[in-house]
């Protein structure tokens, strides 16, 4: 099932309006709003929205959305039932990059 709240969150995150997205994909603002409330849409519409929002189509489905709060040892990223924004995910990745850089520096110092 398509997670319409993800679409709505991405629209806000990218400083767009539902009207702008609707017009870009060839819909009226009213039709776009009804579609989001109905939680059903054509694949071609979903693909158009994904293109406008610059995300893969799979991003809108529950099982593919980023998660937080439950730590995954394998990926080193937190997961839960609460989708997180791309900004939050990027912040998590920056922290991990910083940790990696720190460990690389320690390793270099040890090898001297």
Image (cartoon, rainbow, N blue to C red):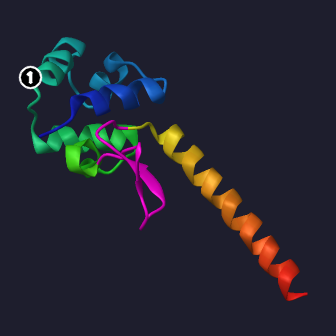
Q: Closer to the camera, 94 or 99?
A: 99
Using a 10 Å C-alpha cutoff, classify the residue at mark 1 as few (fewer than 14 neighbours), some (14 to 19) or many (20 or more): few
Q: Is residue 24 found left or right of 110 in the rendered image?
A: left
* Vertical position of residue 44 compared to residue 104: above or below: above
SS assignment for the magenta stretch, majority: loop
Instruction: Please report the bounds of the magenta region as a residue range.
Output: 65-83
Residue under circle 1? 38
Total numbered labels placed on residues in the image: 1
Q: Is residue 50 found left or right of 78 in the rendered image?
A: left
Q: Is residue 74 one of those drawn in magenta?
A: yes
Please state the horizontal and vertical placement of residue 85, each as a whole percent of the image: 44, 36
Please state the horizontal and vertical placement of residue 47, each as a whole percent of the image: 23, 45
Please state the horizontal and vertical placement of residue 34, each as a whole percent of the image: 13, 16
- Farthest residue toward the bottom? 111
Q: Closer to the camera, 61 or 19?
A: 61
* Vertical position of residue 63 compared to residue 103: above or below: above
Image quadrant in which the C terminus is located: bottom right
Q: Residue at point 44% right, 64% down?
A: 75
Q: Residue at point 21% right, 43% down?
A: 62
């Amino acid at each position: 099932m398509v997670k319409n709240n993800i679409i709505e969150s991405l629209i806000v995150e990218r400083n767009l309006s539902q009207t702008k997205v609707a017009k870009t994909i060839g819909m009226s603002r009213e039709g776009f709003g009804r579609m989001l409330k109905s939680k059903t849409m054509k694949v071609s519409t979903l693909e158009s929205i994904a293109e406008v929002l610059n995300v893969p189509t799979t991003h809108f489905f529950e099982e593919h959305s980023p998660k937080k709060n439950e730590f995954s040892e394998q990926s080193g990223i937190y997961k839960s039932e609460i989708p997180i924004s791309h900004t939050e995910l990027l912040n998590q990745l920056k922290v991990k990059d910083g940790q990696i850089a720190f460990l690389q520096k320690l390793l270099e110092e040890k090898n001297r």
